[in-house]
Image: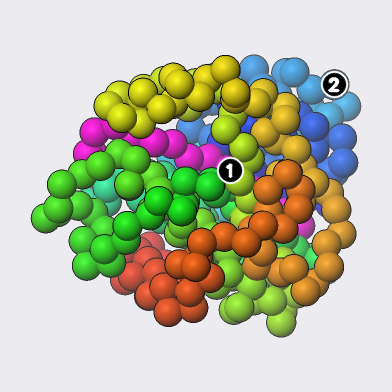
Amino acid sequence: MKLAITGPTSGIGAVAFSQLAPHFNEIFLIARNASKAKKQIETLSTQDQKKVTFIYCDLTDMESVVLAAKSIGEKTSSLDVLINNAGGIFQNKEITKDGFEMGLAANHLGHFLLTHHLMTLLLASPRPKVINVSSEAHRAAKVDFDDLNYANKKFSSFVSYANVKLFNILFTKSLADKFGDAGLQAYALHPGVVKTNFGKETSGFFGFLWKLSAPFMITAEEGAKTTIYLAKSKIDSLKNGYYFKKSKPLKPSSEANSKKMRDRLWQESEKMLAKWL
């Protein structure tokens, strides 16, 4: 069994990586920071360390994403599980060198492109899975498909985050639609409100809410449970494309279930990423 995971050097990604390592024969640790990745690998047993290959990837740099997928393809002919875990909330509007709003690139476009380029490897596996870490924040989304990079409208860090977390679910459902017949299983999940460094950089109303909810937050260990469950468990094929919370299916927002929205998102994503597809 072969696993690839993004964002495995901190928070729930680090816990998922560590706890899943004994269950896989080969692991591709996809991260931007080589020294953090090295430290993370060193937390494993000597036996498990030998299974891990560090793959450099900056999800906000699309050329880097293409090279990361190519590098994995040079090392294996199949992939069983891809966990698209990396993500973040960005307080101010930033535009990447490719011209994308930072949150859109880090949370959605980078993973869309990575999954696209790894699809041949995934479909070479007998029961491939793609697991996308979303959030209950998706329920606050206010999507404007005509201005995904905030060229014309006022930027809100929370709405931007809510939108991309909705995109994670829409993307999951599209993967199930498009590749389910070829054997691919795709799941999205809400990890819970996890006590990590994730929300420390935020200010304004969202920052206030974050501080207010701090005493009720769960640990990264608890937050990683659903990711680990989805990666390890055999799940009924009728639940392909589902959204999970606390290792159980949960009904997402009506927008998350909209076929029109997921088709539009796929179309817009392909349009934006055309030169790297």
Q: Is residue 143 magenta?
A: no
Pointers 2 and 1 in contact (C-beta within 8 Å): no
Quarter residue 31 falls in: top right
SS for callout 1: loop
Main SS category, magenta section: loop
As drawn, the label of residue 264 is none
**Residue marked by disc 2:** 46
Spot occupied by residue 253 in the image (x, y as percentages of width and height): 51, 61
Residue 117 visible at all: no
The residue at the point 83 percent across, 29 percent down is 48
Q: Magenta segment range? A: 79-97
The residue at the point 58 percent across, 43 percent down is 85
SS for callout 2: helix
Q: Is residue 125 left or right of residue 65?
A: right
Mark toward the start of the polypeptide (2 vs 1): 2
Q: Is residue 206 left or right of residue 49?
A: left
From the viewer's perspective, is residue 22 above or below residue 121? above
Q: Is residue 86 magenta?
A: yes
Q: Is residue 22 left or right of residue 148?
A: right
Image quarter (top left, top right, bottom left or bottom right) of the C terminus? bottom left
The residue at the point 75 percent across, 38 percent down is 225
The residue at the point 83 percent across, 49 percent down is 232
Spot occupied by residue 155 in the image (x, y as percentages of width and height): 21, 44
Spot occupied by residue 38 in the image (x, y as percentages of width and height): 63, 21
Residue 219 visible at all: yes
As drawn, the label of residue 85 is 1
* Kind of residue indicated by mark 1: Asn
Q: Residues within 10 Å of mark 2 (few under 14, many from 20)?
A: few
